[in-house]
């Protein structure tokens, strides 16, 4: 396991590299700072490529909340800071409507220095109220993906997509690329992350484990069942100690896929706002 030290100096270098104003190939770093560069440097996508990461925080026994739905303290303080760092390194953070309704998240980088990403909610039926915190005007782009004609607050971009039982993950990524958002973080909930994983669209998956036992409640990732362990995914994984939490950095797809936009199957009429 890599003991990770995200000092202000190394985080400033990572943020400036993300902005194209510096690099990670030189510098006098401690072992812990070099681990931080390994963890977060991998989140910086090469221009012209599409990078889709996901992050989930869970307990030692694989739970993400209690039976009553309390998920506020699953991740420790260092796990929460890690999530905010991941947000700072992407173009957009994506959540499903159930997460948006239950947690009413802000999806900002308020715990670390950095730029707030665009905020995207997948809301097929238009259930999220317009006073949700992720729709608040703070300078960041706000996007809702839906299948119905539900009015949204001024400045909120609306993407209309068709669906069967759920909007296809590939259609979501293609539409966001069409909006200039190529580097994405799928933040939750677990079902939304699982859909992108099963569609083989994730580049990386971060599983942040906090040292607590919940005992019951919803599990983390739940994908399609397999009959034999030989069928299980065994991603290339690095493990990082972040103080209160341990992060498993799993390479689950190609390191950087060429951006798919423009996509022949996506007509311009499918995009609104």
Image (spheres, rainbow, N blue to C red):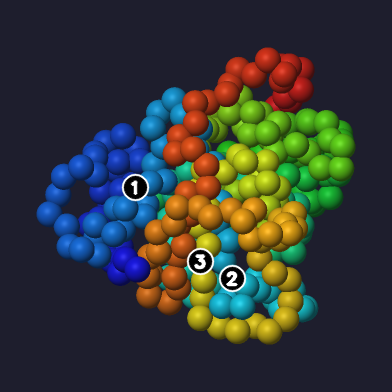
Q: Position of residue 44 (x, y in %)?
A: 39, 42
Disc 2 from disc 1: Cα separation: 23 Å
* Mark 2 closeness class: few <14, some 14–19, many ≥20 residues within 10 Å: many
Frontmost residue, 61 versus 14: 61
Image-based side of 260 in relation to 169, left or right: left
Vertical relation: 117 (above or below) 155: below
Residue matched to label 3: 208
Q: Position of residue 25 (x, y in %)?
A: 20, 42
Disc 3 from disc 2: Cα separation: 6 Å
Query: In which quadrant of the rendered image does the N terminus lie?
Result: bottom left
Q: Is disc 3 in contact with disc 2, using a CB cutoff of under 8 Å?
A: yes
Residue 73's quadrant in the figure?
bottom right
* Camera sees residue 150: yes
Frontmost residue, 224 versus 220: 224
* Numbered disc 3: secondary structure: strand
Q: Which residue is rendered at x = 16% and y = 45% of the image?
A: 26
* Numbered disc 2: secondary structure: strand
Q: Which residue is rendered at x = 35% and y = 41% of the image?
A: 18
Q: Which residue is rendered at x = 49% and y = 38% of the image?
A: 254
Disc 3 from disc 1: Cα separation: 17 Å
* Numbered disc 1: secondary structure: helix
Considering every residue shown, the one lying at the far left of the view is: 28
Q: Position of residue 84 (x, y in %)?
A: 47, 58
* Camera sees residue 135: no
Q: Earlier in the sequence, mark 3 or mark 1?
A: 1
> Which mark is on residue 41?
1
């Amino acid at each position: 396991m890599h003991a990770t030290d995200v000092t202000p100096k190394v985080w400033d270098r990572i943020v400036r590299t993300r902005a194209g104003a510096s690099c990670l190939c030189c510098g006098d770093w401690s072992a812990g700072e070099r681990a931080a560069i390994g963890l977060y440097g991998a989140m910086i996508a090469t221009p012209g490529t599409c990078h889709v990461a996901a992050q989930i925080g869970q307990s030692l026994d694989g739970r993400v909340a209690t039976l009553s739905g309390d998920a506020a303290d699953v991740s420790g303080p260092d796990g929460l800071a890690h999530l905010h760092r991941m947000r700072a390194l992407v173009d957009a953070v994506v959540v499903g409507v159930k997460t948006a309704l239950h947690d009413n998240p802000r999806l900002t980088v308020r715990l670390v220095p950095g730029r707030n990403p665009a905020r995207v909610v997948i809301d097929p039926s238009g259930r999220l109220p317009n006073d949700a915190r992720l729709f608040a005007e703070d300078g960041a782009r706000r996007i809702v993906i839906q299948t119905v004609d539900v009015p949204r607050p001024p400045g909120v971009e609306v993407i209309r997509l068709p669906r069967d039982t759920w909007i296809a993950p590939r259609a979501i990524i293609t539409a966001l690329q069409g909006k200039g958002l190529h580097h994405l973080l799928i933040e939750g909930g677990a079902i939304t992350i699982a859909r992108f994983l099963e569609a083989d669209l994730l580049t990386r998956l971060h599983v942040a484990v906090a040292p607590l036992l919940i005992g019951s409640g919803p599990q983390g990732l739940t994908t399609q069942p397999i009959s034999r362990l030989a069928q299980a995914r065994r991603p290339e994984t690095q493990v990082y100690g972040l103080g209160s939490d341990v992060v498993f950095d799993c390479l689950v797809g190609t390191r950087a896929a060429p951006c798919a936009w423009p996509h022949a199957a996506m007509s311009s009429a499918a995009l609104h706002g």
